[in-house]
Image: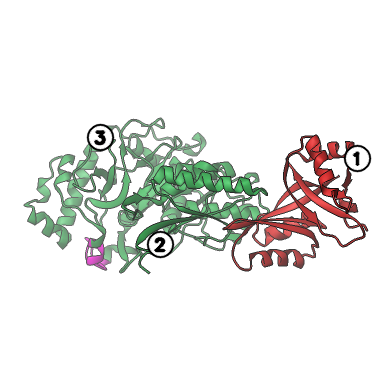
Chain colours: A red, B green
Amino acid sequence: MKVTQISSFIENRPGRLHAACEALAAKGVNIHTLMLADTAEFGILRLIVADPEAGKVALEAAGYIAKLTEVVAVEIPDDAGGLAGILAKADAAKLDIEYMYAFSTAVGQRAVVIIRFSDPDQAVDELLARGVNVVAPVELLRG
Amino acid sequence: MMLRENWNDLGQGFHPVSAPDYLPVAQLRELQLRRLRAVVTRAYDNVKLFRERMDERGLTPASIESLADLGRLPFTIKTDLRDTYPFGLFASPMGEIVRLHASSGTTGKPIVVAYTQEDLQVWASAMLRTFASAGVHRGDIVQNAYGYGLFTGGLGAHYGLEAIGATVVPTSGGNTDRQIMLMRDFGVTGICCTPSYFVHLIERAKELGVNLKELPLRVGIFGAEPWTDEMRRHIEAETNIKAYDIYGLSEITGPGVGSECSAQSGLHIFEDHFYPEIVDPETLQVLPDGEEGELVLTTLSKRAMPMIRYRTRDITRIIAEPCSCGRTVRRIARIARRSDDMFIIRGVNVFPSQIETALLAVEGALPHYRIILSRDKGLDQMGVEVEVSAAVFSDQVRAMEELHKRLAHSIERITGIRAALRLVEPHSIPRSEGKAKRVWDERNS
């Protein structure tokens, strides 16, 4: 049920993010969503792509660091309080969230967030037990 | 000391030519004194600059009655070689000189050094002893990635390897992908190059999907630049090799002045040919064994270009205590500092090796770095760029900021200087195929 995320170290220099995306494009790796966390000097790029292994190889071949980590994709009801409801359940289960970002797909009524938990396995179990709709990788792009 | 014919069967470290490594000390001193008198006489008779300096001090070769008298002789410094460029310090006629080498130095005219046939034999035997002490033997396939040409590293290692009977692969420097291909395809067991270039080879091999740990590569002979024990640990952790430090300089002979043995605890100086002294760099007084100062070397056997009391600019100390390997020739501590590499920032003396120690002390996986000195509003700034490796990278900002803080703190703790530390992407720092360039001084540009 977990989703594999690629993360990469990007220096704060013109063209570096572009070159990383080019490297993925050249190998036909489609980016579903991304989030760039930035500091004054560097950024950490997190990517959800169609084929994480191929994405890692493509980035490394272009000289980037690429690391695979497991994150959890959660479908939330697209109405007021939808996200709060999920977070309340995570809190109740004492799950530790490192960071999260929205999965911006333009499909139907679905809203998906990608959550990086300290312990993804525990998170999946706890969320499922609480009736949260945890999305499997194959379902990510389905309408 | 019995010379054994089947030395190769003994495994590591002993070859008949290595016998002087084990001379009884009294015998060694006697040999040194005899050779010292001969070389001083030779230099006095044939080298004008040396004779003039001796005459000024009222000294003649006959003034040498003991090894301690060496301390009364004038020093030779690097600028003497430049001032007498190209052949002014030669003690042999060109008809006897069979090889010239030259090192560019960093500024101005190159330094030219010369060898007679006998000098080349001594050099090859010193390099043979170097390889023997690192456990290289007949049957080893050794890739020699030191630069061939005017630089003494390539040919120096080459003749030593041939002399010991190893199979030499003379790749010289550069063309890293081919180096890795040959290393794998030939089943190379030993490698010679600068430690910084080997770190580059490790990195490139990983990218090419070649696991160095699966190759028969077991020994590395690294020199031509100062490096640290932390770097050794990094190299030994990334490969299955034992990494040996060697020491030498063109002015004295080239590589082969000294080398580590299996104990990896200081470098044995082949002092039957190269006599070491340690002097205080300020007062130039000779210091007792064990005290740190500048290494001064005298070539006891050199014919074409004898060097009397050559100031190396390398900071070390002599280790006179017996070594567990049984060699009786004295050791010097690993040279991590050269006075030439030192830079002064805000009145504090800093050596590049201190930065290396500081970085590797934190993570052990960050061997690519450079130091950039700049001046901002009249104040010196030290910038340190460090390449992030896959091993230390985290997808969490907090972890990366924590790494940044630990590295900066480690540099400040070791040098006393607060550096502007920057984490940079892999491959963003230029790689060297020979001696690594660590410091970019932009203060006067």
- The answer to whether the residues at label 2 and label 3 have Cβ atoms under 8 Å apart is no
Q: Mark 1 lies on which chain?
A: A
For disc 2, the marked residue is: B374
Does B84 lie within the magenta span?
A: yes
Q: Is residue B291 left or right of residue B435?
A: left
Same chain, labels 2 and 1:
no
The numbered mark at residue B85 is: none
Q: Does residue B241 show up magenta in the picture?
A: no
Residue type at mark 3? Gln
The percent coordinates of residue B197 (x first, y second) are 51, 55
Q: In this view, does B91 lie to the left or right of B108?
A: left
Q: Which of B236 and A124 is in front in this view?
A: A124
| Count of all numbered marks drawn on residues in the image | 3
Task: Give the number of the mark in front: 3 or 1.
Answer: 1
Badge 2 or badge 3: first in the primary sequence: 3
In this rendering, position of residue B403 left or right of residue A36: left
**C-alpha separation, residue under disc 2 versus residue under disc 1:** 59 Å
**Residue at image point 27% right, 66% down:** B95
Q: In this view, does B142 lie above or below A61?
A: above
The answer for how far apart the CA atoms under marks 3 and 1 are is 88 Å
Please give the residue where the numbered disc 3 appears in the rendered image: B27
